[in-house]
Image: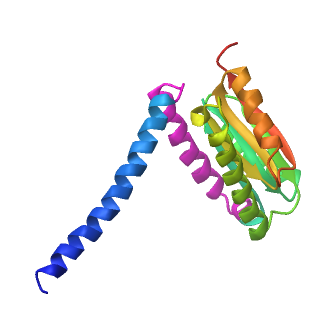
Amino acid sequence: MRALLPLIAVVLMLQGCAGAIMVGAVGGAMMVNDERSFKTQIDDTNADFNVSAALSSHDDLNNQANISGIVMNSNVLMIGQSPNSMLRDKAIRVVKELQIGGKIHNQIRIGNPTSFTTRSNDTWITTKVKGRMLNEKGLDVTNIKVVTENGEVFLIGYVERDQADLAVEVARNTAGVRKVIKVFEYTDS
C-alpha cells in the first residue's frame, strides 16, 4: 500500500501536466495561425496588461466605472460603462498616455456599471458565439476575438472581408446578442 501512494501522486501530477501541455499546444497553434507577427502578438498581450494596470491604478475609475480595453494589432477597443463623461474621458486619456500606437475605439457607454448577473450572461453569450464560430464551415476563428459587453458583441481581428462578414452573421444569429459591432482590420485592403 505504501508503494501505491507515491504512484498515485505521480499519476495525479501527470494529469495536471497533460492539461497544461494541451493548453500550451492550443495556444501555440493559435499563435502560429495568427496573421499578426509574433512580435505584434507579444506587444498586444503586453499592451493588454498595461491598459488593465493603468485603468485599475485610478481609484475613481476602479470604484465607479466598469471599463476595460482589448488590444489587437496595436488598436485598443475600450468598452464598459462609466457613470459620466468625465470618467469616460479620463479612461481614454489614461490609455492614450500609454502610447500603444494604434487607434482607440471608444465604445464606453454612459450609465451604471453592469451587474454580476449581466457580466455572467455576457460571458455565456461570448462562449456561445465562439462555439458557433468554431462550428461554422469556412470560418477561420484564429484571428478573431469575441468580447461581449451588456449584450453587445464586439468582433475584433485582422481578417479578410469575407471572414468578417461570416463572423458577423454568426454572431448576429446567436441568442442573447443585442447588437454586433465590428472592429476589424482587413488583410485584403
Q: Main secondary structure of the magenta part?
A: helix
User: What residue is rendered at 52% in x and 29% in y?
Assistant: 34
Estimate the x, y position of residue 1 in percent, counting from the top left.
13, 87
- Stretch in magenta: 34-62
Image-based side of 129 in relation to 179, left or right: left
Task: Please name the colour scheme applied to the rendered image.
Answer: rainbow
Q: Measuring 79% from the left and 48% from the top, which residue is drawn there?
A: 174
Q: Looking at the image, can residue 106 be seen?
A: yes
The residue positioned 29% from the left and 70% from the top of the image is 12
Q: Position of residue 128 (x, y in %)?
A: 70, 52
Instruction: Name above or below for residue 40 compared with residue 80.
Output: above
Residue 60 locus on image (x, y percent): 73, 62
Q: How many marks?
A: 0
Which residue is nearer to you in this view: 187 or 57?
187
For the view shown, which residue lies furthest in the left direction? Answer: 3
Image quarter for residue 56? bottom right
